[in-house]
Amino acid sequence: MLWGILYLIIKILPLDGIMTGKNPTQEQNLDLRNRLVSFIHGLMAFLFTGYAFITQRTECGELNNTYQRNVIIFSMSYFTYDLICMHFEGLLDKAMLIHHPLCMFGLFLPMYENISGNFCMMAIFISEISNPPMTMRHLFRLTGRRYTKGYEVAEISFICLFIYGRLIAGLPIIYQTLICSSNHIFLKITCIGLTT
């Protein structure tokens, strides 16, 4: 509900003026507004999981704590919102039709089993760390600012954070997830998918 309300607020904002270039289409206008919500989720999820990543040391087989459950619900609600919103706004493509339900199921399992929330938090961290600059790249493109210094900074930040998230921090997290006998097989399979 939070995400839907946020999108409706962003949808009524007069953002048409920031889009430059050859007559932006209605689809580009809707995409811009939806990506602003995506940016907010990505940044908040990164901050929430980054805090847990830095401050909480966990072990295989631990029960989920309240903080983990809240962050998982936060992200699961976003993916549910985004899937529905993209469908109704005509922005849903086949990749997102597969990606979002898999994310939702991957987040649902630790909630249902009340275990592996710690690994889920680490997975969110390594996947969301590069999301804000990736979304900024799209926003720069949608607003006709493709050939600017801001776009270049977003591009370089995205590449560096993607490599850090998927390889430097990601590979040890993926290894820990795979060797933990308490983790559901589906969680292990989706964790491998994070490297792509």
Image (cartoon, rainbow, N blue to C red):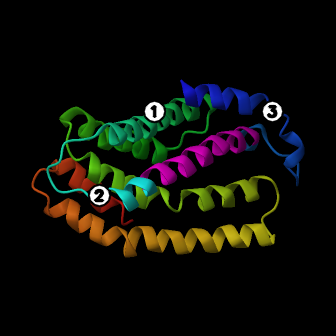
Query: Which quadrant would the C terminus be assigned to in this image?
Result: bottom left
Is residue 20 positioned above or below 90 on the image? below
- The kind of secondary structure element at disc 1 is helix
Determine which residue is flagged by label 3.
13
By secondary structure, the bulk of the magenta-drawn segment is best described as helix
For image coordinates 68% across by 61% down, the residue present is 137
Q: Residue furthest left?
A: 181
The image quadrant that residue 54 belongs to is bottom left
48 is within the stretch colored magenta: yes
Amino acid type at circle 2 is: Cys
162 is within the stretch colored magenta: no
User: Total of numbered circles in the picture?
Assistant: 3
Q: State left or right for residue 139 relative to residue 65.
A: right
Determine which residue is flagged by label 2.
191
Q: Position of residue 188 (x, y in %)?
A: 21, 55
In primary-sequence order, the first of circles 2 and 1 is 1
- The kind of secondary structure element at disc 3 is loop
Q: State left or right for residue 25 relative to residue 21.
A: left
Is residue 54 positioned above or below 1 on the image? below
Q: CA distance from mark 2 to mark 1?
A: 20 Å
Q: Position of residue 186 (x, y in %)?
A: 21, 48
Amino acid type at circle 3 is: Leu
Q: Over which residues does the magenta segment extend?
A: 29-49
Q: CA distance from mark 3 to mark 2?
A: 38 Å
Determine which residue is flagged by label 1.
77
Q: Position of residue 127 (x, y in %)?
A: 43, 58
Q: Position of residue 30 (x, y in %)?
A: 71, 37
